[in-house]
Amino acid sequence: MAYISGAGFTRVTNHWDLSLEDLAVEAGIRALEDSGHEEIDAVVVANSFSGTANGQEDLSSIIVDQLGIRDAPSFKVSLEGASGAAAIITATALVNSGIARRVLVIGVEKMSDVTALEDLTLISSTSLDRRFEREIGATIHSQHALIMQTYMRRYNIGEEDFGHFPVLMHENACVVPHAQFRYKLKLENYMRSPYLAEPLKLFDVPAEGDGAAAVVVSERGEVKISGFSISSGKVMLSLREDLLRLDVVRSSVKRALDMAEMDLSSISFTKIHDSSSVLAYLQLESIGLAEEGKAPQLTAEGRFSRDGEMPVNPEGGLKARGYPVGASAVYQAAEAYLQLTGRVGESQIDGAKSCLLLSISGVGSGATSIVLTR
């Protein structure tokens, strides 16, 4: 069985003075220090855009070389926003199979190397189908907006109802030292934010950030990787039976919980992939934490607050902790590891013993789920 035995990360921000490789090495060293400098048998790097945003491929070889790790296999795993979870699952499989005893997983992304807004939009939209979506003008923001319009019509809610989730995320991030946006967001300021693609607002989505996080996956440790799963579905929105059903989330979460021999009632807190407010609500509903159409109301009522019935993203999620795309799920795992070992200070959830980590690729085309227990 595989465990997490160490974790480390950088702050999420625009790291103008550090390279992609510098960030990865810094996070890797911190995770190795936290694990007691155990010998590493393999390195798995999670990243989405190094080839397009940074002009660098064969990234894992460069990182391993700079870390001074010798004779250990290394490779990069890419699954857009779920890259980090896919890398952790890969490392878990290596340990569970006996191929490796200890695997260093490093997630890293540096989007500030892309300075033109048009280029950033193009790169962030590469998860869409280039033939039938991007080439007719679709962007990542326009797709989220289409889903948001559908949600508003079906459940008869207004734009302000989508503000409850980013308000909560900013509230959570205020006490998190490595978070990108450590300030509170008022609902009126959310409503005044400009449209990216109506009705999707600037404050509905996270800002791309630079950052790196790392965990050591070992045959022994304090936090057990009790279950995991990856599901893939339809990429194109036009081919989905229902825009408001994330079947990949339902199947991925169910399989991960089944593997862990647990149910939702035994989960202490949850981390989701809030790449937009509406996607956050759909994940909460698809997991089973809210009835369909009720996630906005339950968020406003405090069910998902850090001291609520089911805490969600206690460090602020993608929206406020920050969104270094390929590294985001490794941040989830590293933060969860520190939560479960009681080492996060003011953002600590009392009595946390288990968590569910959920990551999304594209606009819900794929989902990865990991269950951690102590």
Image (cartoon, grey):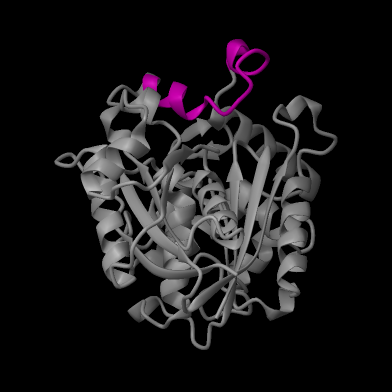
Where the N terminus falls, by quadrant? bottom right
Q: Is residue 332 above or below residue 4?
A: above
Q: Quadrant of residue 110?
A: top left
Q: Residue at x 71, y 62 (%)?
A: 256
Q: Do we see residue 338 in this rendering?
A: yes
Q: Which residues are magenta?
A: 119-137
Q: Do we see residue 245 in this rendering?
A: no
Q: Residue at x 67, y 32 (%)?
A: 146
Q: Number of numbered discs present?
A: 0
Q: Residue at x 71, y 27 (%)?
A: 236
Q: Is residue 243 above or below residue 339?
A: above
- Residue 112 placement, left or right of 365: left
In reply to whether residue 134 is colored magenta, the answer given is yes
| Residue 112 x, y percent position in the rendering | 28, 34
Q: Quadrant of residue 140?
A: top right
Q: Quadrant of residue 118?
A: top left
